[in-house]
Image: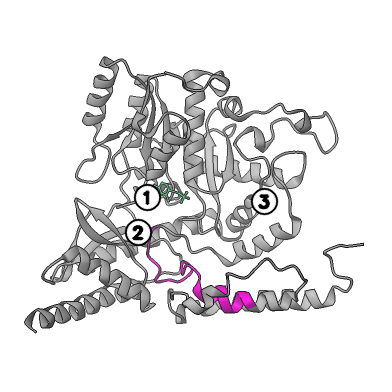
Amino acid sequence: MASLDPEDWSGLRVLGHRMLDDMIDHLAELRDGPVWQPMPQALRQDLHAPLPREAGDPEAAYEAFRRLVLPYATGNLHPRFMGWVHGGGNPVGMLAELLAGGLNANLGGRDHAPIEVERQVIAWAAEMVGFPPEASGLLVTGTSIANLIGVLVARTAALGPEVRREGVGAARLAAYTSAAAHGCISRAMDMAGFGSAALRLVPTDPDGRLHLPALTAMLAHDRAAGMRPFLLVGTAGSVDIGAVDDLSALATIARGAGMWFHADAAFGALAALSPRLKPLLHGIEEADSVAFDFHKWGQVPYDAGCILVRDRARQVATFGTDAAYLRREARGLAGGDIWPCDLGPDLSRGFRALKVWMTLQSYGADRIGQIVEQTCDLAQALAVRVDAEPELERMAPVALNIVCFRYRAGSGDLDRLNADIVADLQEAGIAAPSTTVLHGRLAIRAAVVNHRTQLDDVNALVAGVLEAGRCRARVGISSTAA
Ligand SMILES: *Cc1c(COP(=O)(O)O)cnc(C)c1O
């Protein structure tokens, strides 16, 4: 008979122990290596092989991983990775992934312990943002999907469960969010059938927060034009500069206008674990739904997004299913009332909850909150360094952990120069900031998210930017002189 299990487990056991030792070494030593290195073209070719028909050694597959994959990964484990908003993962989370893979549980539904673990994690998440204990929720890939779920639940709240059969039709519904909101809100409106044009982008104030008077004016204007405002999305930690909307004021406006209030707190939600930063989120506890990621500031390995919905009935009304093959029974494995597949679009779902559950138990929520604070302190230190360097210019206020700045001492196209500086640092493996565009000008964007990042790393980023900038400025001057 053909099975995939070995007849003799000893070889696999040896291989497994080696993998574990190697990955622990990798974590222990990663500070000494480059942040990132581009994958050589010749090696990429090795990933264009035909479908393997014959059995090979798992040892050989592991060697291929060590040769082709391990050295050329994203780099987000490294303390000097500051690009985008990437979490650094954690060692216990890594081990939990092994356990989850071993169990191979399907958390779409049925009656088993892994689902209870997920419910526990959702209850912890609800407690973190100040939601009532009976709130419901789900772990998903990331905040992009969590926001989509938020929009879909808001859609049911506005149009009733019939919308699932009838579609949105000609309903003239409008949603509102800040111009600094993440692009996935617009995509969610698109995917939910409203069209991205039904999303109004409200201008921001100088701190990057949704401008409340502008929102009020837009609401009045749309109502007068026969539109029905149904959804307001607040941002807690904007992707560009880390700005936090006045969530309390937004909650009040949403309630007054009969709108669903959803908070995109992708990374900002975790600030709730820091007593010092928590007041910034004031009002998040009033939201109807909150989307956030454990894989960013929560340091849980990818992927681990989360949607919370205050009123479970709304979430069930949006996704509940009564397919015959998913029948619930009073007893046995098909027991349990509401299954996770009643709360979101996925049926088969992996055991994401385990790595969150084990991470939170092992380090404690306070420690995660301390790391969140630490990354904000490092961002402040970086801002101070930038402000003190005449060759550098800060380009946005620092509300949380993101610093946007640029090298301004060069002549010519400063956008090009700064994009080159960022690519230089990445390719040299020195640091990995990313870029963004603020008020039409390209900025170097450093988001300090990783628990491994220290003051030396932030200083190394500044030194690297200055060196690359001076070097490029010199080359630029000599080439124009020539
Ligand atoms: C990262 C981010 C998202 C998208 O989250 P994913 O987990 O990447 O899907 C949405 N909104 C904000 C504010 C973010 O920072």
Toward which corner of the image does residue 100 lie, by quadrant?
bottom right
- The residue lying toward the viewer, choosing from 481 and 154, is 481
Toward which corner of the image does residue 174 lie, by quadrant?
top left
- Mark 1 and mark 2: Cα distance apart in space: 9 Å
Picture coordinates of residue 457 (x, y %)? 36, 74
**Which residue lies at the image location 38% right of the left edge and 59% below the top edge?**
84
Contact flag, marks 1 and 3 (Cβ < 8 Å) = no
Task: State yes or no: Cβ of the residue under disc 3 lies below 8 Å from any atom of ligand 1.
Answer: no
Q: Nearer the viewer, mark 1 or mark 2?
A: 2
Residue at image mark 3: 351
Residue 376, numbered label: 2
Residue at image mark 1: 277
- The residue lying toward the viewer, choosing from 413 and 207, is 413
| Span shown in magenta | 64-84
Give the amino acid type for the residue marked by disc 1 in the picture.
Answer: Leu
Q: Secondary structure at mark 3?
A: loop
Asked if residue 204 can be seen in this view, the reply is yes
Furthest-front residue in this view: 50
Left of 44 or right of it: where is 207?
Answer: left
Check residue 314 for magenta coloring.
no
Picture coordinates of residue 292 (x, y %)? 47, 45
Furthest-left residue in this view: 481
Give the amino acid type for the residue marked by disc 2 in the picture.
Answer: Cys
Q: Nearer the viewer, mark 1 or mark 3?
A: 3
- Mark 1 and mark 3: Cα distance apart in space: 31 Å
Ranked by sequence position, the earlier of labels 1 and 2 is 1
Asked if residue 27 can be seen in this view, the reply is no
Q: Secondary structure at mark 2?
A: helix
